[in-house]
Amino acid sequence: DASPGHFATTGSTQQTACAKGSFAAKARSEACELCAPGYFQSAPGQAACFRCAPGKLCPQGSTRELDAQCSPGTYVNVTDADGDPDCLDCPAGSSCAGGGAALAVCSPGTAAKPAQGQCTVCGVGTYQPDSGATGCLECELGTFCPKGSSAQLPATCPAGFYIGNASTTLESLDDCVGCTPGSFCAGGAAQPTACAPGSIAPSANMSACELCPIGRFAASTTACEECEAGTYAASEGLSQCTPCPYPTGSKSSDVTCSICKEGFYLQNASALPEDIFRGPTKHCKTCPPNANCATNTTLETLGVRRDYWRASLFTTEIHKCDASDHCSGSGGSTETSRRLAASGGAGPGCDPGHTGPLCEWCVSDEQYFSRAERGCVDCPTAGRFGVLAGVVVALAGTGFFSYRTLARAEAWDRFRARLDIVESQVGFQPKFKIVVSFYQVVATLGPVYGVRLHEDFTRWTDFMDAISFDLLGLTYPDACIGSMADRLLLAGLWPIASIMLGGAAIACYALAEWLLSGHAGSDLVRSTLRRLLYWAILVAYLVLPSVSRSIFKARQCESFNVDDVTGERRSYLVADLDVLCSADDDEYSGLDAYFWAFFALWPVLVPLAFLVLLLSIRSEVRAQRVRATARASRFLWRDYDPGFLFWEVVDMGRKLFLASLVLFIQTDDGSSKLLRLVVATVVSALYAAALALAKPFKRDDDLYLACTANLLLACSFVSGTVIQLCESDEEMCKALVGFESARGASEFVIALTAAMLIATLLVVVFRTVSAVRAPTIRLVSSGRPPVLELSPECHFHGFISHMWATGQDQTHTVVRRLQLLLPGVRIWLDVDNLDDVGRLEESVADATTFLVFLSAGYFKSFNCRRELYAALHLNRPFIPIHEADVDKGGASIEDLKAECRKHCDNAAPDERERDMLARVCPSYSGPDEMLARVFGQEAEPPIVWVRGNAFQLESLKAVALRMLRHSPYYASRQAELAAGLMVPRQPGPCAFSGPVTILMCRANERAIGIARELKNAAGEGRGSTASAGAVAIRDAEEALEGVNAAPLSGRVVFLLYLNDETFLDTGGAVARLVQAAMDRRIAIAMVHEQEPSHGGVPFRNFFQQTPQVLQQPPYKLYDKVALPLYPAPAHRKVSLRLILTSMGAVPCDAGPLRRRWQLLRRHIAVARLVWWRPASRDSLAEASLSQEPQQMVQP
């Protein structure tokens, strides 16, 4: 085995030593390894190589060390693998001599940069205490460093001086420099030190800095300056002033912050400065709106702009002077009235001559504050009352004499009657009450709710005040009348005086009438008492809201804050700003007795009196037997349904609450709050809902107008809320509401109130025009209105007798319609004229004719029999009117005759009946006499009362004609009435414009007769465009189903006569032919028989007997109206004309355009009925026949 340092190849017998530059580290090596780079071996047979010495070079397999040759500043790289040495740059802090020398670290006092051959010695003024440094350090000021120094050497100078450039050029310690201003030198080795913040060195060579005193700060290192306003320096040596804590401020050079900054005010001027500084937000408050707060503003020196006012110098409650131009703001005089000065109630900020809250009171007792003039003006002289009284008397006298003069004129009665008719049609009274009530409440927006409308609308607010009937306030200024007690006394008593004066005038008029007429009796006394009661009710109703509001002025106060610190408020009486609302004010305390006395009289007793009055007449009104008291108080109940008799009291309570009682809410400051407006809005809205649900008014237009009024009232209160918000904060007004200012909301209120007036006027004008243009009865012979002359002993043209239970409603319709058709006619009606039920006989004697409305139970009524006997005894002409509709309280003639025989018996066992007969009609012979007068006049049988407009008109014309025949004027002029009466625009003769074929079914009994009547009626008019010969009548079965039937030409109409047997014919021919006609799009003209003896039945019966196929789509037979056919000649003529019109005939007096228009409308109506295309006739006929056995039954 080869030993280390030797090798042996395979097969050799001995080992071989490794050559120089190689080695074999292990035994049994087969080859030697070369020395690695950086190692050498100079001897053979070695087991390892040696490392090269520093600065030597040993490539791989080196047998010896080679010398390296590097330049200064570099050193040899002993790890290179090649044969040549690598030289590297010497690192910083060391020196490299070159050649094969190793790098050397620089010693203290020297330094070297990279690639430097030798270390550099530190120069004068520099030093280096460490080894291997890359550079020298500069000596600090006050030290000394010679060349090659490894440390700083200390130096010393006197105080106020320092070694100026010792670090760079100092050659001797004797060279010291003096300190500059703004710094100090402590001496010795110390260098100059800048003054610390808050201290200064104003001159050179200072050994210490001085501190800035309090109130000043070091603006630089050489001088102190004063603190600016808004900052402070509470201690010495401050480099800057401290800003004052929010929201305080200070003056220049202040040592603390004891005032308030701009935009804030000091609430308590006596507060200590240290308290203000410690609690700035407690003492400094935000400047209130409409005020100016400069720096150092206190509550007393608060700047108030002109047109604004505050109650004292100790309050921030600033109010805008909306009504006065004399609020001077912060300036102005403190001049005040005697009472305000005595009570301490004077406030600053008013121009001379003005004082009180918002400068709305006058210093002089001879002046009053005028909102129109926006300042104080002189009171009118006392003679103004005399002038006003004279004007009133002159107007009253002129009116009285004008009335007396017109009353003697012939046309006066007619005009008055026409005016009464127009009033009954229009309903002036309820509309007047609604609009007056509306404005009485709206007028309180300012005085009660504190809503001040913009000054540009003063005239409109004056108009609303005038409608509110506050006559005292309109005629003379309150402040000029006297003390508040005098005004309250006058406000509560003047309506009573007006009632008494009006009553005296009425009594004088009655006395004059009695003296002139020479009549005496109780009638004049009762009528006078009725007039007095009516006048008292009218006055009390109109003035109640305004008088109640005047009474509440004794309690309506407005409070103002006078001290923010203590919270003290001072309340003023709004009606008299000279009076303080305080128990300490004797005048205010003295108003209590007046207030409660008048409160009990007006807001309490007057509504209660109205309620008691309505309770006392309740039964009369509901029974419509109105007596004297009920008639005198009709102003309260006439506009409402009997079931809502007390609604006027409810409405009165609403008005009282909104106009006065709401003042109990927040008595002192309610007018500046929103609660009253919110409550009023809710009340108005709820009342409008109650009106819509209850519907208390008789007339729909009155109900709609009342609902509209309350809706507008609620909107006005909402707008008032908006005005209050906008006045308090215009920015919020614009952001939330959308109005730029309160003026926009004021304009909206004015628009609402004007809309109410416009709506009322439109309704009144429309209804008046309709009433004036309503057609009236005229004579056919002359075309003029009839003459309505009365007998000298009578005051009525007719007395109408009726049964309350069954004829009341229709009787009223008869009278009202006759009054419209005959302007000036006077008909006695119980609800209008009954004063005493015990004087019925006198009332019958006061009428020229006697109208009897015959309905079921008429002869059973004791009072009706009294009226009959009185008319019989007085031989008054009877005009019977028969109600034939059983469903509407009517009865047949036979039943009425039987009823008459039973109850109009002079031999009746009833003692009361016999006594009445003996007193009223002693010559009465028995029921036959009564039957003869009521039913037995064949020439003038009872007039049938029919409800349809055109038919009702014929009934009314018949009644009017009979009344005229028995009038004194026409007693000798019967020829003028021979042609009868007519009403313009009533249905007249009509005719067809071309050939017409009327189809009728022979199984439809009586249809042929109706068709012939229609043919005759078609040719009765003068100037007809088609004669009766142009109307052909054909059998429907032959025309529609005949094999050899002639074709139908021209206009074709199928006449269907409806009675109790129409669809009950054998074989169902009527139903089949109606169906066939509708299949061929032939118009169906249905005629409904009304006479029971001819099979007339209610229309509902036809739904039971008509085949369902005709009632269902596509036929819908009864979608078209069936025209009624009445038996009475006058009514039958109207029926025939209406039937002809439904068939396409046009009025004979119509012009070409009107005829074409009516024909076009007729064609459109027919086209709408037959727009569908029906199924085949055979299939529908089969369906009809399949249902016929079930449908054709007796009704």
Image (cartoon, rainbow, N blue to C red):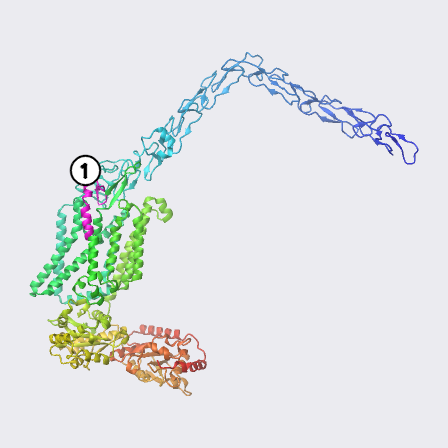
Q: Residue furthest right?
A: 13
Task: Tell me residue 601's x, y (percent).
Answer: 18, 52
Most foreground residue, 1169 or 491: 491
How many C-alpha atoms fall within 10 Å of the one at disc 1: few (<14), some, or many (≥20)?
few
Q: Residue furthest bottom?
A: 1044
Q: Which residues are drawn in magenta? A: 573-601
Q: Which residue is mark 1?
A: 338
Task: Tell me residue 1096's x, y (percent).
Answer: 30, 80
Residue 1027 visible, this angle: no
Residue 847 visible, this angle: yes
**Where on the picture, by quarter, is residue 43?**
top right
Is residue 835 left or right of 1096 when viewed as pictured? Answer: left
Task: Tell me residue 848's x, y (percent).
Answer: 14, 73
Q: Please tell me which residue is depicted at 6% across the width and 63% down the height of the picture.
A: 515
Task: Tell me residue 761's x, y (percent).
Answer: 26, 59
Is residue 941 left or right of 1119 when viewed as pictured? Answer: left
